Amino acid sequence: MTHTLNVYLFQCKWCLYSPADQDWVDHQLPENVHLVKVPCTGRINNLYVLNAVQAGADGVLISGCLPEKCHFKEGNLAARRQLDAFGEFLGYIGYEKERVRFAWLDLQDRGRIQKEVARFMEALAPLGPSEYLATRRKEGQHA
Amino acid sequence: MKVCPYDAITLVDTKVPFRGMIPIATVDAGKCMACGLCAASCRSTSIALAEDTTDAQVIADIWAHSPKAGGAR
Amino acid sequence: MPDLTQAIRTEAEKLFAEGKVELFIGFRPENSPLHPQPAFFTQANQLDDLTYGGLCKNNLATFLPKYPRDKKIGMVVRGCEERAVNILAVENQHPRENLVLVGVPCTGIIDWRKLVNIYDEDIESVQEGDDELTLLVKGQTHTMKRQDALHDSCLRCVHPTPKNADILVGEAIPDREPEQAWHAALEQSGKAIDARFAWFKQEAERCIRCYACREACPMCYCEECFVDHIAPRWTESGVTPAGMHGWHIVRAFHQTGRCTDCGACERACPMDIHMTYLTDKLNAEMYAKYGFEAGMDSTTQAPFATFSLDDKLRFQDGV
């Protein structure tokens, strides 16, 4: 039986320059990928990631601009240290580090977001569904 | 703590009920670009932005799409 | 271990006499010999009640943000307390001026629970010798090696002597290597993920959400903690797995680059939860990635309070 792994994608709304990519993210994401659009990856509070993990996310993909290309100057660097450390810390607790991934896109990168999502799903497959921290998943409380 | 890329936040001594005269983060609205970095970094989550999507809405959205147990389709 | 109580009293008396302090924070004995309490002296003639010893388990820096910034306060500080005072100054919670720190090189805080685990609640008195403790239990005398009674955080302590105290009472104790401070966390890191989670679950799920750890910690000074928020409710408030996990994960994470590893949280916990292994890991990360140790001075910002353009090299795409 194959489990479809569920992923939350936190996407900076500025980093997809091409309308085709933007449209893909807005309307054509696979069913198992839920989009959370943010004005900047720097806007992502670690508590968002925690909630996604406890909701049952098998993976969290955070996609934003390269530092030199951030719409808000070097804004996305401020939270990077924290998000990166938080992802590793979750790994220490029981949510594999590989389940939290960052994808920094250059404005020139057309078609890159689709590849990142596909790559992420491939990388997650051997890890299987998240068990330990998915304590608030719908329809079934984990002990 | 300096996360604002626009230097829009300064600490200004303000009279706060029950806490006295203390430095409080004050935003210069003219400089603020609503990027939300301040809100993301604030440990006590005391900063809110007047924006389209509030923290409460993001969290509600995350929970509305919580996958079913087992993830099997 | 020399009895420093009289030396501290003498210094505090001088400070009152010279008008340098309006308040002196220290400890006083209580009915239970294992639990001296923090004490707040406003006059020199109260200082006969002041005590000091290995059983003084609170981190006194936690009280500073409650006072007005211009109040002249004197305080006893051990290594970890002085570092907490520095961090409070860096984070704008209480300025270093107007504080007179009476520094005490620390030979370690006794873990009261280690004594109770052996002798139950029947301990009538505890005398501290140089390397040994002498306990009176139901009329019988027992001795115990001091090393066996110390709190785990103290066994790993890197900086037992306050570096920037105004007055130092007693002989300075040299620093130890930072690397040895985190071996407990690193050992945990080496385990397989199911073993790591099993340990976390075993510890965190005993939590009763009393927040004694938060009250004991000098770095938990937020007027409204993230768990007290209801819009949104960031983490469940009860003793559900989600709630307990969320509380411990995020509280530890909010300590990153700020925790002095004093262990006051563990000593305060009624459920004997071992939570320092979480903050230890984060402290080890901050040291490894940024060469940072919290509280070494009263001006340097913690790694999360700032960023550098070099950071773009740190966080590579993908794994």
Image (spheres, grey):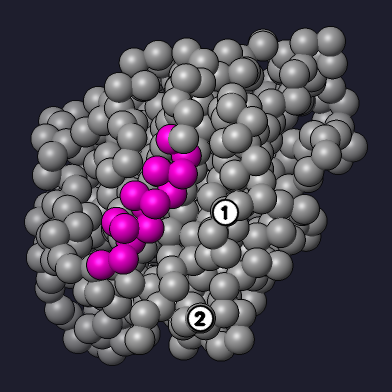
For residue C227: magenta? no
Q: Amino acid at mark 2?
A: Arg
Near-viewer residue (B58 or C176)? B58
* Labelled disc at residue C123: none
Residue C43: name its quadrant. top right
Q: Which residue in the rendered view is the most extreme toward the front?
A: A20
Q: Amino acid at mark 1?
A: Leu
Q: Residue at x 61, y 18 (%)?
A: A71
Q: Secondary structure at mark 1?
A: loop
Q: Secondary structure at mark 2?
A: loop
Left or right of C268 on screen, residue C115: left
Q: Is residue C309 above or below residue C186?
A: above
Task: Read off the magenta span.
Answer: A112-126
Q: Which residue is mark 2?
A: B73
Near-viewer residue (C206 or A1)? A1
Q: CA distance from mark 2 to mark 1?
A: 16 Å
Q: Residue at x 71, y 59 (%)?
A: B61
Left or right of C284 on screen, residue A111: right
Q: Residues within 10 Å of mark 1 (few under 14, many from 20)?
A: some
Question: Where residue C52 sits: x, y (%)?
Answer: 37, 49
Residue C202 visible in this rendered orientation of the protein = yes
Q: Residues within 10 Å of mark 2 (few under 14, many from 20)?
A: few
Q: Which residue is mark 1?
A: A29
Chain on which label 1 sits? A
Chain on which label 2 sits? B
Question: Where residue C154 sits: x, y (%)?
Answer: 24, 51
Near-viewer residue (C227 or B52)? B52
Q: Are marks 2 and 1 in contact (CB under 8 Å)?
A: no
Question: Where residue C161 sits: x, y (%)?
Answer: 25, 32
Residue C93 visible in this rendered orientation of the protein = no
Q: Residue at x 73, y 48 (%)?
A: B55
